[in-house]
Amino acid sequence: GESVGLHLPTLSVQEGDNSIINCAYSNSASDYFIWYKQESGKGPQFIIDIRSNMDKRQGQRVTVLLNKTVKHLSLQIAATQPGDSAVYFCAEKAQGLNGNQFYFGTGTSLTVIP
Amino acid sequence: DTEVTQTPKHLVMGMTNKKSLKCEQHMGHRAMYWYKQKAKKPPELMFVYSYEKLSINESVPSRFSPECPNSSLLNLHLHALQPEDSALYLCASSQEASYSYNEQFFGPGTRLTVL
């Protein structure tokens, strides 16, 4: 299953399928990106990060892809499990008016169907 | 210890009350953050402390008053809040505020309800 982030804030996938969560970021000067997972009633939990000098980074069952040309970030989760059900946020680090800070995307709610 | 702790977990307060939220980390991080998160929305940055000094205030109303007593502790003092201030308040920390490639570690949050 695949989401387009801002336009489809929910994504449902069958257990065992791969999930793709997308994020469009706004600042071409952003040099660091993080994907966070937030389960109900909990704080955001770090999943994986990527620097702007990279196109791809892999973790355990997760892969982040960065396309700087179109300012697009995606999170791929392999063999999605029920425990992956959560809201996923991308965050970009950029220089704001008040200094270097993270800006969070709107989030995508992932539901895994057993 | 790679944890950020927050107390209390839940807080209900009236509009005339004064209360405080507390945050603690023992990772040696020198940057600490307060975020506000409404339901189904992303976290919104409120304050950043760098080396125990306030470095960013995102135009937060004065009824929210942050304090950083030392490098491990961060407080958020609340006074005369409005019902629309009800939200999840998240604390986070990172090694440095200015260095680009520092991950932020989040606490579990305090669920605040203002009656």
Image: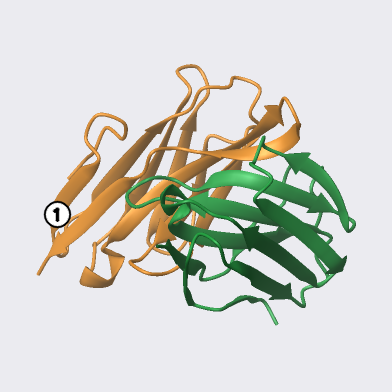
Chain colours: A orange, B green
Left or right, A108 with respect to A29, comes to left
Which image quadrant is residue B33 in? Answer: bottom right
Height in image: B77 above or below A35?
A: below
Residue nearer the viewer, B17 or B97: B17
Q: Which residue is mark 1?
A: A13
Residue at (27, 32) in percent of width and height: A4
Residue at (81, 72) in percent of width and height: B72
Residue nearer the viewer, A25 or A96: A96
Label 1 secondary element:
strand
Residue A106: give x, y in percent of width and height: 38, 38
Left or right, B47 with respect to A45, comes to right
Height in image: B28 above or below A55?
A: below
Q: For residue A46, say whether it is visible.
A: no
Q: Amino acid at mark 1?
A: Val
Circle 1 crowding by C-alpha within 10 Å: few under 14, some 14–19, many from 20: many
Which image quadrant is residue A5 in? Answer: top left
Residue at (62, 70) in percent of width and height: B19
Residue nearer the viewer, B66 or A51: B66
Question: Disc 1 is attached to a residue of which chain?
Answer: A
Q: Residue lying farthest front? A: B16
Q: For residue A21, say whether it is visible.
A: yes
Residue at (39, 34) in percent of width and height: A23
Residue A69: give x, y in percent of width and height: 50, 17
Residue A80: give x, y in percent of width and height: 24, 62
